[in-house]
Amino acid sequence: MIVEVRTSERVDIVDVTSDVAETIPAETDDGICTVYVPHTTAGVIVNEHESRLLSDVERALERLVPRDEEYGHNVVDDNADAHVRATLLGESVTVPIVDGDLALGTWQSILFVDCDGPRTRRLRISVVDG
């Protein structure tokens, strides 16, 4: 299953939990759901969707991998920082499905992180019935 995500900023964090949940087939009671980002300048994480925390994540990414550093890859696309940030975030998450729902913790959400937007991106969702 493919889910499209539109971002509006260069670094943008989008809660995709409900989009992912909608892809779980009605007949699936228990299993696993994997969310995969087929892009080298974006990632996906599980964390709290709270505006101050999201700002903290963005600031941390900037401190860890500053945009204005000299990177060899910038000769090609001028987006090496986005590639490195995506490497730190990771390209997939796997969440259990219990009783037909994503078994996320109370404050957990599935968050798509675009490091080189704004763009329209895709998530690949795979559900395995258990």
Image (cartoon, rainbow, N blue to C red):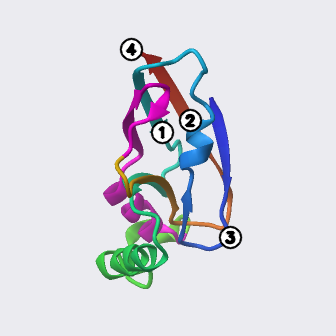
Evaluate whether residue 70 shows in this view. Answer: no
Q: Is label 2 in contact with label 3 (beta carbons under 8 Å)?
A: no
Find residue 23 and report its image quarter.
Answer: top right
Front of the two marks 4 and 3:
4
What kind of element bears circle 4? loop
The residue where tag 2 is placed is 124
Rendered position, 60 above or below 47: below
For marks 4 and 1, give the CA distance: 19 Å
What residue span does the magenta drawing correspond to?
78-104
Q: Earlier in the sequence, mark 2 or mark 1?
A: 1
The residue where tag 3 is placed is 8
Q: Nearer the viewer, residue 66 or 123?
A: 123
Front of the two marks 2 and 4:
4
Rendered position, 78 above or below 69: above
* Residue drawn at 39 percent across, 81 percent down: 59
For marks 4 and 3, give the CA distance: 37 Å
What kind of element bears circle 2? strand
Evaluate whether residue 58 shows in this view. Answer: yes
Q: Is label 4 in contact with label 1 (beta carbons under 8 Å)?
A: no
For marks 2 and 3, give the CA distance: 20 Å
The residue where tag 4 is placed is 130
Let me know if residue 96 is in the magenta part.
yes
- Dot 4, how many residues are within 10 Å of its Cα: few (below 14), some (14-19), or many (20+)? few
Picture coordinates of residue 94, whole percent (x, y):
37, 36
* Image quarter of the C terminus: top left
User: In the image, which disc is placed on residue 36?
Assistant: 1
* Residue drawn at 39 percent across, 54 percent down: 108
* Residue drawn at 48 percent across, 56 percent down: 111
Q: Earlier in the sequence, mark 4 or mark 3?
A: 3
